[in-house]
Amino acid sequence: MVRKMDKYDINTEERILKAAKSVFHRKGMYGARMQEIADEAGINKAMLHYYFRNKENLFKAVFRDAVEKIFINVSKFLESEGTIDESIKNFVENYIDIMIENIYLPPFILNEINQNPEKLSEFFKPLLESLPVQLIKKILKETSENKIKPIDPRDFIINIISLCIFPAIAKPIVKELFNMDDEKFIEFLKNRKKSIPEFIINSIKLT
Amino acid sequence: MVRKMDKYDINTEERILKAAKSVFHRKGMYGARMQEIADEAGINKAMLHYYFRNKENLFKAVFRDAVEKIFINVSKFLESEGTIDESIKNFVENYIDIMIENIYLPPFILNEINQNPEKLSEFFKPLLESLPVQLIKKILKETSENKIKPIDPRDFIINIISLCIFPAIAKPIVKELFNMDDEKFIEFLKNRKKSIPEFIINSIKLT
DNA sequence: CATTTTTCTAACCATATAATTAAACTATTT
DNA sequence: AAATAGTTTAATTATATGGTTAGAAAAATG
Protein backbone atom coordinates (compact mmCIF):
# COMPACT_ATOMS: atom_id res chain seq x y z
CA MET A 1 0.00 0.00 0.00
CA VAL A 2 1.84 3.05 -1.12
CA ARG A 3 -0.04 5.64 0.84
CA LYS A 4 0.84 8.69 2.82
CA MET A 5 0.47 8.52 6.57
CA ASP A 6 -0.22 11.17 9.08
CA LYS A 7 2.67 11.40 11.38
CA TYR A 8 5.60 10.62 9.11
CA ASP A 9 6.80 10.79 5.62
CA ILE A 10 5.76 13.92 3.82
CA ASN A 11 7.50 15.97 6.41
CA THR A 12 10.43 13.63 6.70
CA GLU A 13 11.11 13.39 3.00
CA GLU A 14 10.71 17.11 2.58
CA ARG A 15 12.88 17.83 5.55
CA ILE A 16 15.59 15.57 4.12
CA LEU A 17 15.36 17.32 0.78
CA LYS A 18 15.51 20.72 2.38
CA ALA A 19 18.53 19.79 4.46
CA ALA A 20 20.18 18.16 1.46
CA LYS A 21 19.70 21.31 -0.57
CA SER A 22 21.21 23.43 2.17
CA VAL A 23 24.28 21.23 2.48
CA PHE A 24 24.82 20.41 -1.19
CA HIS A 25 24.38 24.02 -2.26
CA ARG A 26 27.04 25.12 0.19
CA LYS A 27 29.51 22.23 -0.03
CA GLY A 28 28.88 20.59 -3.37
CA MET A 29 28.69 16.87 -4.12
CA TYR A 30 32.16 16.03 -2.79
CA GLY A 31 32.17 18.35 0.20
CA ALA A 32 28.72 17.34 1.43
CA ARG A 33 28.50 14.70 4.18
CA MET A 34 25.53 12.40 4.64
CA GLN A 35 25.91 12.85 8.38
CA GLU A 36 25.65 16.61 8.12
CA ILE A 37 22.50 16.32 6.03
CA ALA A 38 20.98 13.92 8.54
CA ASP A 39 21.88 16.25 11.42
CA GLU A 40 20.42 19.26 9.67
CA ALA A 41 17.24 17.30 8.95
CA GLY A 42 17.11 16.17 12.56
CA ILE A 43 16.94 12.49 11.66
CA ASN A 44 18.97 9.32 11.60
CA LYS A 45 21.49 8.78 8.84
CA ALA A 46 19.79 5.55 7.82
CA MET A 47 16.69 7.52 6.87
CA LEU A 48 18.58 9.18 4.06
CA HIS A 49 19.15 5.77 2.54
CA TYR A 50 15.61 4.68 3.28
CA TYR A 51 14.18 7.62 1.32
CA PHE A 52 16.82 8.18 -1.33
CA ARG A 53 18.81 4.95 -1.43
CA ASN A 54 22.23 6.66 -1.74
CA LYS A 55 24.13 9.93 -1.92
CA GLU A 56 24.07 10.03 -5.70
CA ASN A 57 20.27 9.85 -5.78
CA LEU A 58 19.85 12.50 -3.16
CA PHE A 59 22.26 14.73 -5.00
CA LYS A 60 20.45 14.26 -8.29
CA ALA A 61 17.16 15.30 -6.72
CA VAL A 62 18.79 18.47 -5.45
CA PHE A 63 20.62 19.17 -8.68
CA ARG A 64 17.61 18.60 -10.90
CA ASP A 65 15.61 21.04 -8.83
CA ALA A 66 18.36 23.65 -9.06
CA VAL A 67 18.70 23.35 -12.84
CA GLU A 68 14.97 23.77 -13.31
CA LYS A 69 14.80 26.87 -11.14
CA ILE A 70 17.61 28.53 -13.03
CA PHE A 71 16.84 27.45 -16.58
CA ILE A 72 13.10 27.52 -16.93
CA ASN A 73 13.23 31.29 -17.15
CA VAL A 74 15.80 31.26 -19.88
CA SER A 75 13.25 29.56 -22.11
CA LYS A 76 10.63 32.13 -21.14
CA PHE A 77 13.03 34.82 -22.33
CA LEU A 78 13.55 33.16 -25.64
CA GLU A 79 9.86 32.64 -26.26
CA SER A 80 8.95 36.19 -25.34
CA GLU A 81 7.40 38.43 -28.00
CA GLY A 82 7.76 42.16 -28.39
CA THR A 83 10.65 44.45 -29.23
CA ILE A 84 14.18 43.45 -28.36
CA ASP A 85 14.29 46.22 -25.75
CA GLU A 86 11.27 44.79 -24.00
CA SER A 87 12.67 41.28 -24.16
CA ILE A 88 15.89 42.42 -22.53
CA LYS A 89 14.14 44.30 -19.76
CA ASN A 90 11.77 41.43 -19.04
CA PHE A 91 14.52 38.88 -18.98
CA VAL A 92 16.92 40.82 -16.80
CA GLU A 93 14.32 41.86 -14.23
CA ASN A 94 13.02 38.35 -14.02
CA TYR A 95 16.44 36.81 -13.85
CA ILE A 96 17.87 39.11 -11.22
CA ASP A 97 14.84 38.32 -9.07
CA ILE A 98 15.62 34.65 -9.46
CA MET A 99 19.25 35.36 -8.53
CA ILE A 100 18.19 37.21 -5.40
CA GLU A 101 15.98 34.37 -4.26
CA ASN A 102 18.39 31.60 -5.25
CA ILE A 103 21.77 33.12 -4.81
CA TYR A 104 23.36 29.76 -3.97
CA LEU A 105 22.25 28.03 -7.14
CA PRO A 106 24.52 29.49 -9.82
CA PRO A 107 27.78 28.67 -8.06
CA PHE A 108 26.41 25.25 -7.14
CA ILE A 109 25.29 24.34 -10.65
CA LEU A 110 28.29 25.75 -12.46
CA ASN A 111 30.73 24.12 -10.12
CA GLU A 112 29.14 20.70 -10.51
CA ILE A 113 29.13 21.04 -14.28
CA ASN A 114 32.76 22.12 -14.37
CA GLN A 115 33.79 19.23 -12.16
CA ASN A 116 31.59 16.79 -14.02
CA PRO A 117 30.76 18.04 -17.50
CA GLU A 118 28.98 14.83 -18.43
CA LYS A 119 26.13 15.98 -16.19
CA LEU A 120 25.37 18.41 -18.96
CA SER A 121 23.93 15.73 -21.18
CA GLU A 122 21.94 14.22 -18.35
CA PHE A 123 20.26 17.39 -17.16
CA PHE A 124 20.67 20.14 -19.73
CA LYS A 125 20.61 18.76 -23.22
CA PRO A 126 16.83 18.74 -23.59
CA LEU A 127 16.78 22.30 -22.26
CA LEU A 128 19.60 23.64 -24.38
CA GLU A 129 19.07 21.96 -27.68
CA SER A 130 16.43 24.09 -29.30
CA LEU A 131 16.88 27.17 -27.18
CA PRO A 132 19.28 29.53 -28.88
CA VAL A 133 18.04 29.11 -32.43
CA GLN A 134 15.00 31.35 -32.17
CA LEU A 135 16.82 34.08 -30.28
CA ILE A 136 19.73 34.08 -32.69
CA LYS A 137 17.30 34.50 -35.58
CA LYS A 138 15.59 37.35 -33.78
CA ILE A 139 18.88 39.18 -33.22
CA LEU A 140 20.07 38.59 -36.76
CA LYS A 141 16.76 39.98 -38.03
CA GLU A 142 17.12 43.12 -35.93
CA THR A 143 20.67 43.72 -37.10
CA SER A 144 19.89 43.09 -40.76
CA GLU A 145 16.97 45.53 -40.55
CA ASN A 146 19.36 48.07 -39.03
CA LYS A 147 17.40 48.31 -35.81
CA ILE A 148 20.46 47.57 -33.66
CA LYS A 149 24.19 47.61 -34.17
CA PRO A 150 25.66 44.48 -35.73
CA ILE A 151 26.68 42.02 -33.05
CA ASP A 152 27.44 38.31 -32.94
CA PRO A 153 24.23 36.86 -31.47
CA ARG A 154 26.32 34.47 -29.41
CA ASP A 155 28.14 37.38 -27.80
CA PHE A 156 24.85 39.09 -27.18
CA ILE A 157 23.39 36.08 -25.38
CA ILE A 158 26.51 35.42 -23.32
CA ASN A 159 26.81 39.10 -22.40
CA ILE A 160 23.29 39.32 -20.98
CA ILE A 161 23.66 36.11 -19.05
CA SER A 162 27.13 37.08 -17.77
CA LEU A 163 25.88 40.38 -16.41
CA CYS A 164 22.98 38.73 -14.59
CA ILE A 165 24.65 35.64 -13.19
CA PHE A 166 28.24 36.63 -12.46
CA PRO A 167 27.56 38.69 -9.32
CA ALA A 168 25.86 35.67 -7.79
CA ILE A 169 28.95 33.57 -8.43
CA ALA A 170 31.35 36.21 -7.16
CA LYS A 171 29.18 37.30 -4.24
CA PRO A 172 31.82 37.04 -1.48
CA ILE A 173 34.37 38.96 -3.57
CA VAL A 174 31.91 41.65 -4.56
CA LYS A 175 30.87 42.13 -0.94
CA GLU A 176 34.49 42.39 0.16
CA LEU A 177 35.47 44.64 -2.73
CA PHE A 178 32.80 47.23 -2.00
CA ASN A 179 32.41 46.70 1.73
CA MET A 180 28.85 45.46 1.50
CA ASP A 181 26.84 43.50 4.03
CA ASP A 182 24.14 41.14 2.77
CA GLU A 183 21.53 43.86 2.69
CA LYS A 184 23.68 46.22 0.63
CA PHE A 185 24.51 43.38 -1.71
CA ILE A 186 20.83 42.67 -2.40
CA GLU A 187 20.33 46.38 -2.93
CA PHE A 188 23.17 46.30 -5.45
CA LEU A 189 21.52 43.43 -7.31
CA LYS A 190 18.13 45.15 -7.32
CA ASN A 191 19.66 48.25 -8.87
CA ARG A 192 21.09 46.11 -11.59
CA LYS A 193 17.55 45.27 -12.71
CA LYS A 194 17.54 48.79 -14.17
CA SER A 195 21.20 49.37 -14.91
CA ILE A 196 21.89 46.19 -16.88
CA PRO A 197 19.12 46.76 -19.45
CA GLU A 198 20.29 50.36 -19.84
CA PHE A 199 23.86 49.17 -20.25
CA ILE A 200 22.91 46.63 -22.89
CA ILE A 201 20.44 48.76 -24.81
CA ASN A 202 22.85 51.66 -24.94
CA SER A 203 25.52 49.42 -26.31
CA ILE A 204 23.46 48.05 -29.20
CA LYS A 205 21.29 50.99 -30.17
CA LEU A 206 22.11 52.89 -33.30
CA THR A 207 23.29 56.44 -32.85
CA MET B 1 72.48 21.69 5.09
CA VAL B 2 69.54 23.04 3.20
CA ARG B 3 70.87 22.74 -0.27
CA LYS B 4 69.56 21.56 -3.58
CA MET B 5 70.93 18.34 -4.92
CA ASP B 6 71.30 17.09 -8.40
CA LYS B 7 69.20 14.04 -8.76
CA TYR B 8 66.24 14.85 -6.56
CA ASP B 9 64.02 17.50 -5.19
CA ILE B 10 63.64 20.43 -7.54
CA ASN B 11 62.04 18.20 -10.08
CA THR B 12 60.13 16.23 -7.51
CA GLU B 13 58.68 19.24 -5.75
CA GLU B 14 57.78 20.86 -9.03
CA ARG B 15 56.28 17.67 -10.36
CA ILE B 16 54.17 17.38 -7.23
CA LEU B 17 53.00 20.95 -7.56
CA LYS B 18 52.20 20.51 -11.22
CA ALA B 19 50.20 17.36 -10.54
CA ALA B 20 48.49 18.99 -7.59
CA LYS B 21 47.43 21.90 -9.75
CA SER B 22 46.05 19.61 -12.39
CA VAL B 23 44.00 17.63 -9.89
CA PHE B 24 42.88 20.48 -7.61
CA HIS B 25 41.90 22.68 -10.54
CA ARG B 26 39.68 19.95 -11.91
CA LYS B 27 38.28 18.42 -8.73
CA GLY B 28 38.57 21.13 -6.07
CA MET B 29 39.76 20.70 -2.50
CA TYR B 30 37.14 18.11 -1.53
CA GLY B 31 37.10 16.16 -4.76
CA ALA B 32 40.88 15.90 -5.06
CA ARG B 33 42.59 12.74 -3.78
CA MET B 34 46.16 12.64 -2.55
CA GLN B 35 46.58 9.29 -4.30
CA GLU B 36 45.55 10.75 -7.63
CA ILE B 37 48.04 13.59 -7.21
CA ALA B 38 50.79 11.12 -6.33
CA ASP B 39 49.93 8.96 -9.34
CA GLU B 40 49.90 11.93 -11.69
CA ALA B 41 53.27 13.06 -10.32
CA GLY B 42 54.60 9.51 -10.71
CA ILE B 43 55.70 9.27 -7.10
CA ASN B 44 54.82 7.69 -3.83
CA LYS B 45 52.01 9.14 -1.75
CA ALA B 46 54.33 9.66 1.21
CA MET B 47 56.33 12.15 -0.83
CA LEU B 48 53.42 14.52 -0.83
CA HIS B 49 53.62 14.65 2.94
CA TYR B 50 57.37 14.85 2.92
CA TYR B 51 57.30 17.95 0.74
CA PHE B 52 54.04 19.58 1.79
CA ARG B 53 53.21 18.03 5.15
CA ASN B 54 49.48 17.65 4.45
CA LYS B 55 46.66 18.14 1.96
CA GLU B 56 45.77 21.57 3.29
CA ASN B 57 49.29 22.88 2.70
CA LEU B 58 49.48 21.48 -0.78
CA PHE B 59 46.13 22.99 -1.58
CA LYS B 60 47.16 26.39 -0.27
CA ALA B 61 50.24 26.41 -2.48
CA VAL B 62 48.04 25.69 -5.48
CA PHE B 63 45.38 28.18 -4.50
CA ARG B 64 47.82 30.99 -3.78
CA ASP B 65 49.36 30.55 -7.19
CA ALA B 66 45.95 30.64 -8.85
CA VAL B 67 44.87 33.79 -7.06
CA GLU B 68 48.03 35.58 -8.05
CA LYS B 69 47.72 34.63 -11.69
CA ILE B 70 44.18 35.91 -11.88
CA PHE B 71 44.42 39.00 -9.71
CA ILE B 72 47.75 40.56 -10.48
CA ASN B 73 46.38 41.86 -13.73
CA VAL B 74 43.42 43.44 -12.07
CA SER B 75 45.79 45.74 -10.26
CA LYS B 76 47.60 46.50 -13.48
CA PHE B 77 44.27 47.61 -14.91
CA LEU B 78 43.60 49.89 -12.01
CA GLU B 79 47.02 51.47 -12.13
CA SER B 80 46.93 52.04 -15.85
CA GLU B 81 47.05 55.58 -17.16
CA GLY B 82 45.45 56.99 -20.27
CA THR B 83 41.88 57.49 -21.40
CA ILE B 84 39.14 55.26 -20.06
CA ASP B 85 38.71 53.75 -23.52
CA GLU B 86 42.34 52.71 -23.59
CA SER B 87 42.16 51.32 -20.09
CA ILE B 88 39.19 49.20 -21.04
CA LYS B 89 40.80 47.85 -24.17
CA ASN B 90 44.06 47.09 -22.40
CA PHE B 91 42.37 45.35 -19.53
CA VAL B 92 40.02 43.22 -21.59
CA GLU B 93 42.66 42.11 -24.07
CA ASN B 94 45.02 41.25 -21.30
CA TYR B 95 42.42 39.51 -19.24
CA ILE B 96 40.94 37.41 -22.01
CA ASP B 97 44.45 36.22 -22.80
CA ILE B 98 44.84 35.18 -19.19
CA MET B 99 41.48 33.41 -19.40
CA ILE B 100 42.54 31.52 -22.50
CA GLU B 101 45.75 30.35 -20.88
CA ASN B 102 44.23 29.59 -17.47
CA ILE B 103 40.72 28.57 -18.28
CA TYR B 104 40.52 26.28 -15.22
CA LEU B 105 41.40 28.97 -12.70
CA PRO B 106 38.24 31.07 -12.49
CA PRO B 107 35.89 28.17 -11.72
CA PHE B 108 38.46 26.76 -9.31
CA ILE B 109 39.00 29.99 -7.38
CA LEU B 110 35.38 31.06 -7.30
CA ASN B 111 34.20 27.66 -6.21
CA GLU B 112 36.66 27.47 -3.34
CA ILE B 113 35.71 30.94 -2.18
CA ASN B 114 32.02 30.17 -2.31
CA GLN B 115 32.50 26.96 -0.38
CA ASN B 116 34.87 28.62 2.06
CA PRO B 117 34.44 32.38 2.10
CA GLU B 118 36.88 32.80 4.98
CA LYS B 119 39.65 32.08 2.46
CA LEU B 120 38.95 35.57 1.17
CA SER B 121 40.62 37.20 4.13
CA GLU B 122 43.57 34.85 3.96
CA PHE B 123 44.36 35.31 0.29
CA PHE B 124 42.55 38.31 -1.08
CA LYS B 125 42.26 41.05 1.49
CA PRO B 126 45.67 42.58 0.84
CA LEU B 127 44.89 42.51 -2.89
CA LEU B 128 41.38 43.89 -2.67
CA GLU B 129 41.66 46.50 0.01
CA SER B 130 43.04 49.47 -1.83
CA LEU B 131 42.16 48.37 -5.31
CA PRO B 132 38.81 49.82 -6.28
CA VAL B 133 39.27 53.27 -4.79
CA GLN B 134 41.42 54.71 -7.56
CA LEU B 135 39.32 53.25 -10.34
CA ILE B 136 36.10 54.48 -8.79
CA LYS B 137 37.54 57.97 -8.58
CA LYS B 138 38.61 57.80 -12.19
CA ILE B 139 35.13 56.79 -13.33
CA LEU B 140 33.45 59.40 -11.18
CA LYS B 141 35.74 62.03 -12.66
CA GLU B 142 34.88 60.98 -16.21
CA THR B 143 31.16 61.08 -15.51
CA SER B 144 31.28 64.40 -13.70
CA GLU B 145 33.21 65.90 -16.61
CA ASN B 146 30.54 64.56 -18.98
CA LYS B 147 32.98 62.37 -20.81
CA ILE B 148 30.89 59.26 -20.34
CA LYS B 149 27.30 58.51 -19.36
CA PRO B 150 26.62 58.47 -15.64
CA ILE B 151 27.06 54.97 -14.24
CA ASP B 152 27.58 53.51 -10.79
CA PRO B 153 31.32 52.78 -10.76
CA ARG B 154 30.65 49.54 -8.97
CA ASP B 155 28.37 48.40 -11.79
CA PHE B 156 30.98 49.43 -14.28
CA ILE B 157 33.69 47.37 -12.61
CA ILE B 158 31.50 44.32 -12.13
CA ASN B 159 30.24 44.52 -15.71
CA ILE B 160 33.70 44.45 -17.23
CA ILE B 161 34.83 41.61 -15.04
CA SER B 162 31.62 39.65 -15.63
CA LEU B 163 32.01 39.86 -19.39
CA CYS B 164 35.63 38.66 -19.24
CA ILE B 165 35.36 35.91 -16.68
CA PHE B 166 31.90 34.40 -17.04
CA PRO B 167 32.57 32.45 -20.25
CA ALA B 168 35.45 30.69 -18.50
CA ILE B 169 33.13 29.63 -15.70
CA ALA B 170 30.36 28.53 -18.01
CA LYS B 171 32.63 26.94 -20.59
CA PRO B 172 30.90 23.55 -20.85
CA ILE B 173 27.48 25.18 -21.19
CA VAL B 174 28.67 27.69 -23.77
CA LYS B 175 30.25 24.93 -25.82
CA GLU B 176 27.09 22.86 -25.69
CA LEU B 177 24.81 25.82 -26.38
CA PHE B 178 26.59 26.84 -29.55
CA ASN B 179 27.96 23.45 -30.61
CA MET B 180 31.59 24.42 -30.19
CA ASP B 181 34.63 22.21 -29.86
CA ASP B 182 37.60 23.49 -27.86
CA GLU B 183 39.10 25.22 -30.85
CA LYS B 184 35.91 27.10 -31.68
CA PHE B 185 35.55 28.07 -28.05
CA ILE B 186 39.01 29.65 -27.96
CA GLU B 187 38.15 31.41 -31.18
CA PHE B 188 35.01 32.73 -29.52
CA LEU B 189 37.05 34.07 -26.59
CA LYS B 190 39.60 35.68 -28.87
CA ASN B 191 36.86 37.53 -30.73
CA ARG B 192 35.63 38.86 -27.42
CA LYS B 193 38.90 40.73 -27.03
CA LYS B 194 37.48 43.13 -29.63
CA SER B 195 33.75 42.79 -29.05
CA ILE B 196 33.71 43.36 -25.28
CA PRO B 197 35.49 46.74 -25.40
CA GLU B 198 33.17 47.80 -28.23
CA PHE B 199 30.19 46.66 -26.22
CA ILE B 200 31.29 48.55 -23.12
CA ILE B 201 32.47 51.71 -24.83
CA ASN B 202 29.27 51.96 -26.85
CA SER B 203 27.23 51.62 -23.71
CA ILE B 204 28.94 54.44 -21.84
CA LYS B 205 29.79 56.91 -24.57
CA LEU B 206 27.71 60.04 -24.85
CA THR B 207 25.59 60.35 -27.96
C1' DC C 1 -7.82 -6.04 18.28
C1' DA C 2 -4.78 -8.77 15.58
C1' DT C 3 -2.11 -8.43 11.45
C1' DT C 4 0.34 -6.15 8.05
C1' DT C 5 2.72 -2.30 6.24
C1' DT C 6 5.36 1.64 6.75
C1' DT C 7 8.58 4.47 9.22
C1' DC C 8 12.38 4.87 12.16
C1' DT C 9 16.58 3.83 15.27
C1' DA C 10 20.95 2.06 17.04
C1' DA C 11 24.61 -0.51 16.10
C1' DC C 12 27.58 -2.23 12.81
C1' DC C 13 30.42 -2.96 8.45
C1' DA C 14 33.48 -2.21 4.57
C1' DT C 15 36.03 0.79 2.33
C1' DA C 16 38.49 4.93 1.17
C1' DT C 17 41.51 8.25 2.56
C1' DA C 18 44.83 11.23 4.86
C1' DA C 19 48.59 10.60 7.48
C1' DT C 20 52.59 8.15 9.78
C1' DT C 21 56.56 5.23 10.39
C1' DA C 22 60.62 2.63 9.83
C1' DA C 23 63.83 1.48 6.94
C1' DA C 24 66.26 1.66 2.42
C1' DC C 25 68.53 4.37 -0.81
C1' DT C 26 71.21 8.37 -2.76
C1' DA C 27 73.95 12.23 -2.51
C1' DT C 28 77.15 15.31 0.07
C1' DT C 29 80.69 16.27 3.24
C1' DT C 30 84.92 15.55 5.60
C1' DA D 1 85.84 5.70 2.45
C1' DA D 2 83.18 6.65 6.41
C1' DA D 3 79.81 9.57 8.28
C1' DT D 4 76.10 12.58 7.72
C1' DA D 5 72.17 14.60 5.63
C1' DG D 6 68.56 14.39 2.44
C1' DT D 7 65.17 11.68 -0.38
C1' DT D 8 62.19 7.82 -1.42
C1' DT D 9 59.57 3.58 -0.68
C1' DA D 10 56.45 0.01 1.22
C1' DA D 11 53.74 -1.08 4.82
C1' DT D 12 50.83 0.38 8.32
C1' DT D 13 47.55 3.20 11.13
C1' DA D 14 43.66 5.94 12.44
C1' DT D 15 39.76 7.85 11.11
C1' DA D 16 35.93 9.41 8.29
C1' DT D 17 32.41 8.11 5.49
C1' DG D 18 28.86 5.85 2.72
C1' DG D 19 26.17 2.19 3.31
C1' DT D 20 23.77 -1.99 5.67
C1' DT D 21 21.09 -4.70 8.96
C1' DA D 22 18.00 -6.34 12.39
C1' DG D 23 14.53 -5.15 14.74
C1' DA D 24 11.53 -1.71 17.35
C1' DA D 25 7.79 1.71 17.02
C1' DA D 26 3.93 3.69 14.77
C1' DA D 27 0.24 3.68 11.64
C1' DA D 28 -2.99 1.49 8.61
C1' DT D 29 -5.95 -2.40 7.56
C1' DG D 30 -9.51 -5.82 7.98
Image (cartoon, coloured by chain):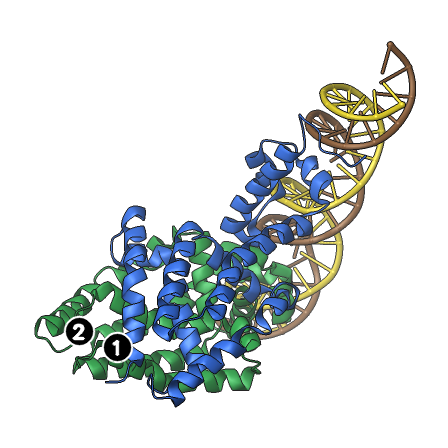
Chain colours: A green, B blue, C yellow, D brown
A167 or D13: nearer the eye? A167
Q: Position of residue A39 (x, y in %)?
A: 65, 67
Residue B56 appears in the picture as rendered: yes
Determine whether B198 is above or below B10 in the image.
below
- Residue A77 left/right relative to A40: left
Determine whether B9 is above or below A59 in the image.
above
Q: CA distance from mark 2 to mark 1?
A: 8 Å
- Point 42% across, 53% down: residue: B103
- Residue A145 left/right relative to A167: left
The secondary element bearing badge 1 is classed as helix
Q: Chain of mark 2?
A: A
Label of residue A203 in the image: 1
Residue A43 appears in the picture as rendered: no
Q: Position of residue A171 (x, y in %)?
A: 51, 73
Residue extending farthest left? A145
Q: Position of residue B153 (x, y in %)?
A: 44, 81
The secondary element bearing badge 2 is classed as loop
Q: Are marks 2 and 1 in contact (CB under 8 Å)?
A: yes
Q: Amino acid at mark 2?
A: Lys
Q: How many marks?
A: 2
- Point 28% across, 62% down: residue: B194
Label of residue A122 in the image: none
Q: Position of residue A84 (x, y in %)?
A: 19, 79
Q: Amino acid at mark 1?
A: Ser
Residue extending farthest front? B82
Q: Residues within 10 Å of mark 2 (few under 14, many from 20)?
A: some
- The quarter of the displayed image where residue A65 is located: bottom left
Q: Chain of mark 1?
A: A
The mark that comes first in sequence, 2 or 1, is 2
Q: On the image, numbered disc 2 is attached to which residue?
A: A149
Q: Which corner quadrant holds the C terminus of chain B? A: bottom left
